[in-house]
Image (cartoon, grey):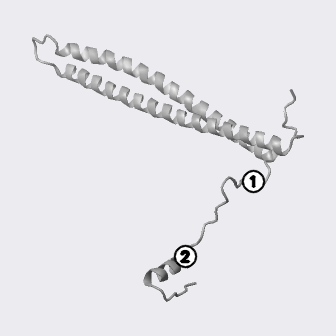
Amino acid sequence: LISYVHDSPSTISSVVQSTTTPSRRTPPLGIRIASTRIHSVSEEDVLEAVEQAEALWAEALEARKTANALSDRAEEEAEAAAGTAKEAENIFQNRTQPVSMQQLVQVDAAAKSNLDATSMVNRALKASEDADRLEQMAEEALRKSEERLEQHLKDFPDSPLAQED
């Protein structure tokens, strides 16, 4: 709705602005508007949240086992690579004769072993990060399931989920 007032251009713009700008209703000072929940938290809601948390913890555990196994394997490969690197280093120290083709192959094998060990370390690190992420998700799911249980017990004090002390 636009009203025209015949006073001045600034009056017209203020009237136009006030009639076209939606007003925001704010409560009077000191009054808080509480949010209202739409439904109660059922026993099924709680059980679903607990099952989700359990599934995430199981997945996180498997991811952690995989990460630990990869870490162990990476450590073994790194130790083996260190041994072959030491042998390759000895080939080039105190040389009085030219390097043979067999020695070059040995140095190449040491370099490949080092690359494989580095690749395994990277895989182990990624698996560990994935396990950390899953553990955080599982922790959050556990927290949410505890919140749902708490709300359920407020909504249904006589629930079979209530623990007897």
Percent across and percent down for residue 149 are: 77, 40
Q: Residue drawn 10% across and 13% down?
A: 97
Which residue is at the far front?
Answer: 7
Q: Mark 2 sits on what residue?
A: 18
Which percent across, then down, holds residue 146? Answer: 72, 37
Quadrant position of the N terminus in the picture: bottom right
Q: In this view, does 8 lie to the left or right of 57?
A: left
Relative to 113, residue 26 above or below:
below
Q: In which quarter of the image is residue 139?
A: top right
Residue sitting nearer the eye, 32 or 143? 32
When asked about the image quadrant of residue 19, the answer is bottom right
Tell me what residue is drawn at x 85 percent, y 35 percent: 162
Q: Quick one: SS at disc 1?
A: loop
Secondary structure beneath disc 2?
helix
The residue drawn where x is 54% and y is 76% is: 18
Q: Which amino acid does label 2 sit on?
A: Ser
In the rendered structure, the answer to whether residue 139 lies left or right of residue 43 reads: left
Q: Residue 37 carries which label?
A: 1
Are there few (<14), some (14-19), or many (20+) residues within 10 Å of tag 1? Answer: few
In percent of width and height, residue 133 lies at 54, 37
Q: Which of 41 and 6 is in front in this view?
A: 6
Q: What residue type is labelled 1?
A: Arg
Q: Residue at x 26, y 14 (%)?
A: 87
Q: Earlier in the sequence, mark 2 or mark 1?
A: 2
Picture quadrant of residue 31: bottom right
Real-space CA distance between mark 2 and mark 1, rounded to the nearest whole angstrom: 35 Å
**Could you tell me which quadrant the C terminus lies in?**
top right
Position of residue 73 measured from the top left corner of the image (x, y, whole percent): 46, 23
